[in-house]
Amino acid sequence: MPPQSASIPSIHTLNAITPNWSEGPNGMLVNQHPTLGGIIDHEIVSKEWFVIFNAELPDINGALLGFVSRESAIAEFCKHIAVQE
């Protein structure tokens, strides 16, 4: 796989915020950190990506849904976690 551009959000982007992200089957990303971790994955049928935060965030009610790409889901995760740090 070619290296990711610094401008394209990737697992490296997530690890810069909270270390220990891991990639599972089919591109799922997980981090068990209780306040800065979560899950980024996609639905099987629609292929839309979603974000679940491990901590309850005041501006999020459950999961963030409907992202067209993994990169856009990562970017949204980073946006919301940056506010919590």
Image: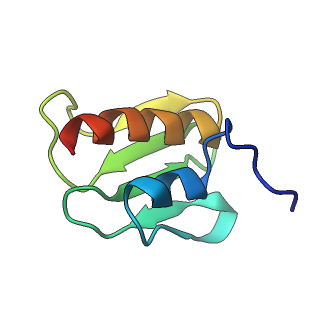
Q: In this view, does 27 lie to the left or right of 19?
A: right
Residue located at (47% from left, 67% from top): 21
Report which quarter residue 59 is drawn in. Answer: top left
Q: Position of residue 24 (x, y in %)?
A: 59, 71
The residue sitting at the right extreme is 2
Residue located at (44% from left, 64% from top): 30
Mark yes or no: residue 46 visible: no
Indicate the quadrant containing the C terminus: top left, top right, bottom left or bottom right: top left
Residue located at (54% from left, 50% from top): 13
In the rendered image, the vertical position of residue 23 relative to residue 75, given as above or below: below
In the rendered image, the vertical position of residue 36 relative to residue 70, given as above or below: below
In the rendered image, the vertical position of residue 69 relative to residue 41, given as above or below: above
Q: Is residue 25 left or right of residue 49?
A: right
Q: Is residue 2 left or right of residue 60?
A: right
Indicate the quadrant containing the N terminus: top left, top right, bottom left or bottom right: bottom right
Residue located at (87% from left, 57% from top): 2
Mark yes or no: residue 81 visible: yes
